[in-house]
Amino acid sequence: MSKQKPLGSGTMSVWAGEENNLWWGATQVPVVHSVSFGYPDVDAWQDVALGRAPGHIYGRNTNPTVAAFEEKVRLLEGADAATSFATGMAAISNILFTLLSPGDRVVSVKDTYGGTNKLFLEFLPRFHIKVELCNTTNHEAIEAEIAKGCRVLYMESPTNPTLKVMDIARLAKAAHKVGALVVADNTFATPINQNPLALGVDLVLHSATKFLGGHADALGGVVCGSKELVHQVYHHREITGAALDPMAAYLLLRGMKTLQLRVARQNESALKIAQFLESQPSVTQVFYPGLSSHPQHEIARQQMRGFGGVLSFMLKGGFDAVRAFLPRLRHAHLAANLGAVETIAGPPATTSHVECTPEERAAMGIPEGLIRYSVGIEDVDDLIADLKQALG
């Protein structure tokens, strides 16, 4: 009997995780708003409560609509298990507080997402957890810090908002040599462009609010990995309570049906826009891993199938130029989000690193005059024309 060909990411985006959740002939996963789930007798109830039989007990723990969303992401990431959260930051904080204890050491990089950076600089040290933040592109320095001993290596690639790329397989191998667990934020890449678990990562996470949902109408987070590790994170989440709402799970499921289509379009448009911006005299630097000029372009080519829908760039004139430029855009929301069907633009000071001071952003290597530009699914010629008139 011939082995069945694996499904493509477009087919999985539409169908994965839904087959067992289409009740009563529904063609869409229903939204189950019930907080609790009843049983005919105590024995059946206890079997579900102890995990001996499938089912649900209480909405803070699990929910049928939420489970369908988790299963779709699990299959797209090629993981054994997945669990979800109310937001992306809930996913990140639950993972870190699950895996780390007082006296442990975590190694990461300086220019992670602002909320993640706050956990490293402000929250974890209060619990006597040691944090070492390295220059993102200095892999030798990261490996040297790993070799000193660490419990968790935390990666983000590409990074938000400077689009730096880490060699995931190389650094995961170094971490595993010292018995560390490896966590990767895959929000920018999405499972369409990159699968960190296949590169040696132990847990991969997403802010589902961004590309997975794609419509800027639902908050959520998700983590995928081995059954053992995911269950540990799930247990922390079920007790601390940052559960994903079933209505948000439904919206994320609906958005994910077009994930492959949207990401393919955004990959193509972002590269064309990055190339256009490189040619503009008023633009001093463009950050996008799909550009041959990007310092980690070759690493990105090796570990990514596409380069994503987010880029960033700097204008001559610094933050004053940013203030003048952004209101001139006609086809971009000036907002603190990314990964939506509409183009979104803004500086780190009001988006990714709004929680940080200018001094903290400078220490992370994030310029005040940077503009993060999340490409939507509009016609790329219209977006380029819009950028051209705004630059003019």
Image (cartoon, rainbow, N blue to C red):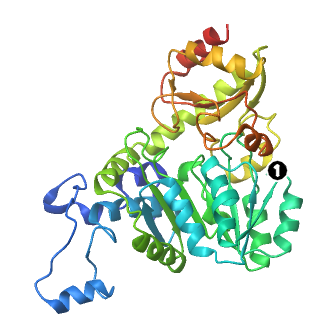
Up-down relation of residue 196 to residue 179 (above or below): above
Q: In the orientation shown, which residue stands out farthest toward the left? A: 40
Asked which quadrant contains residue 218, the reply is top left
**Residue 74 drawn at (x, y percent):** 46, 64
Say what amino acid the circle numbered 1 marks: Thr
The residue nearer to you, when weighing 319 against 279, is: 319
9 and 342: which one is in front?
Answer: 342
- Residue occupying image coordinates x 50% and y 54%: 88
Say which quarter of the image contains residue 345. top right
The residue singled out by tag 1 in the image is 137
In the displayed structure, would residue 219 be above or below residue 266?
Answer: below
Neighbours of disc 1 within 10 Å: few (<14), some (14-19), many (20+): some
The furthest residue to the bottom: 43
Residue 213 in picture, x, y percent from top left? 42, 45
The quadrant the C terminus occupies is top right
Is 373 drawn above or below residue 283 in the view shown? Answer: below
Residue 113: image x %, image y %? 64, 48
Left or right: residue 220 versus residue 299 is left
Front position in the image: 377 or 84 = 84
**Residue at figure coordinates x 63%, y 54% from the top left:** 116
Q: Is residue 100 left or right of residue 223?
A: right
* Quadrant of the snapshot with the N terminus: bottom left
Instruction: State the SS at label 1.
Output: loop
Is residue 288 rendered to the left or right of residue 62?
Answer: right
Residue under the point 10% across and 84% down: 40
Pinpoint residue 154: horizontal percent, then vertical percent.
Answer: 68, 62
**Which residue is located at x 60 percent, y 75 percent?**
99
